[in-house]
Amino acid sequence: MIVYILLLLVLITIFFGPQLWVKKVLKQHQAPRPDLPGTGGELARHLLKRYELQDVKVEAAEEGKDHYDIQAKVVRLSPYVLNERSLTAVAVAAHEVGHAIAHHRQETVARLRTRYLPYAMMIQRLAVIMLFAWPIVSAALRLPYTPVLHGVVIVTLGLVTVFVQLAILPEEWDASFNKALPMLTKGRYLPSQDIPKVRRILTACAMTYVASALMNILLFWRLPRR
């Protein structure tokens, strides 16, 4: 019995731990900072203009759905990031602008999402189909239904989805540490003492995708976005 409890705790840590850590880091640095030169939205517009991305717009997104829309060429920021002055708002905005810059320069790393995300979505949809269809198929073909085997297949498909999405991690890491962090430090938009905090926030931004993928193993209806 203790073994099963420990196994359950390990699984909960694996699936929910990264998501909880990301949320904790982002929330930890949401305190208003009137000393900052602008909101996340103002910084995003400034950086787009500075790096001559005139065709890229900034729009509002749903809360927690910050992303760069490659097709529409729009940096979409949640209302908090768009309108508030805080380390989280500034770092998240710079991260999404980093995606826009990489795509504008047609860097190889900027194509990872478009290359691998369709596979992740396809595998995840297959997992959804298997989740609901397997018992029906087993009954129709008069095959023995084994719940354990059914569960193993579903979890395996979910893990494959995560591994595919891990291939996109370099793109997220590039947006945080090859784009956002240099922009914020070289541009002196933040006091030097805030840089370590911003590093943690940018790490959380990069890991958001993987954390969501882990959650999607248990919540199959949340298909990957971005």
Image: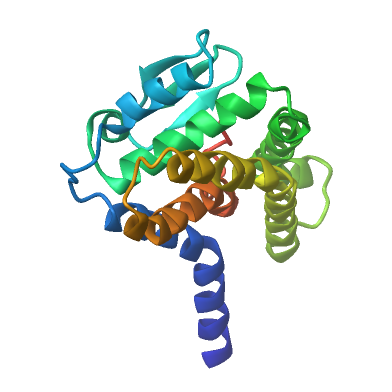
Q: Can you name the residue that lies furthest to the bottom here?
A: 2
At x 25%, y 32%, the residue is 38
Q: Does 146 sit above or below residue 42?
A: below
At x 15%, y 42%, the residue is 34
- The C terminus lies in which quarter of the figure? top right
Q: Quadrant of residue 225?
A: top right
At x 59%, y 51%, the residue is 210
In depth, the one of 1 and 49 nearer the eye is 49
The x and y percentages for residue 176 are 54, 45
The x and y percentages for residue 27 are 29, 53
In depth, the one of 182 and 211 nearer the eye is 182
Q: Does 33 sit above or below residue 145?
A: above
Q: Is residue 53 left or right of residue 196?
A: right
The x and y percentages for residue 128 are 64, 40
Q: Is residue 56 left or right of residue 191?
A: right
Q: Quadrant of residue 192?
A: bottom left
Q: Is residue 154 visible?
A: yes
At x 69%, y 22%, the residue is 105
In depth, the one of 184 and 127 nearer the eye is 184
